[in-house]
């Protein structure tokens, strides 16, 4: 998930996201990595979700603090099997 912040990063907004991350584990979403970036996007969130619907729910829940563009990816080895 590529994200752009809607608010200036502050302890309050970052703690809100940290709390949201801990709740995600309970919903079966595994956060693999969370990165702040420079450039077109402010952040990258790499996660695994049980389904596309769960990924969409995550994007909807985070709309208060950021806009996002979510990409679905599969490992290269799995993609090669499709050829």
Image (spheres, rainbow, N blue to C red):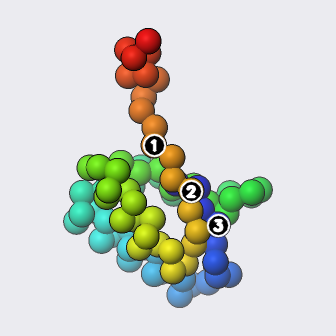
Determine the residue located farthest toward the bottom in the rendered image.
12
Percent position of residue 80, x then y: 44, 15
Q: Earlier in the sequence, mark 1 or mark 3?
A: 3
- Residue where numbered disc 2 is placed: 69
Q: Is residue 67 above or below residue 35?
A: below
Measure the alpha-carbon separation of dots 2 and 3. Answer: 9 Å
- Residue where numbered disc 1 is placed: 72
Measure the alpha-carbon separation of dots 1 and 2. Answer: 10 Å
Q: Is residue 47 above or below residue 21?
A: above
Quarter of the rendering containing residue 27: bottom left
Residue 14 visible in image: no
Q: Residues within 10 Å of mark 2 (few under 14, many from 20)?
A: few
Q: Is residue 73 above or below residue 17?
A: above
Pick the quarter of the image with the C terminus: top left
Quarter of the rendering containing residue 19: bottom left
Percent position of residue 45, x then y: 51, 55
Residue 45 visible in image: yes
Measure the alpha-carbon separation of dots 1 and 3. Answer: 18 Å
- Residue where numbered disc 3 is placed: 4
**What is the secondary structure assignment of the residue under circle 1?**
loop
Q: Residue at x 63, y 72 (%)?
A: 5
Q: Residues within 10 Å of mark 1 (few under 14, many from 20)?
A: few
Which one is closest to the eye, mark 2 or mark 3? 2
**What is the secondary structure assignment of the residue under circle 3?**
strand
Q: Is residue 5 left or right of residue 74?
A: right
Quarter of the rendering containing residue 41: bottom right
In the picture, the disc for residue 44 is: none
């Amino acid at each position: 998930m590529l994200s752009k912040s809607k608010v200036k990063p502050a302890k309050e907004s970052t703690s809100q996201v940290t709390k949201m991350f801990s709740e995600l584990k309970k919903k079966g979403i595994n956060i693999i990595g969370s990165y702040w970036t420079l450039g077109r996007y402010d952040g990258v969130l790499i996660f695994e979700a049980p389904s596309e619907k769960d990924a969409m729910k995550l994007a909807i829940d985070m709309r208060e603090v950021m806009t996002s563009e979510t990409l679905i990816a599969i490992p290269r080895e799995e993609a090669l099997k499709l050829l």
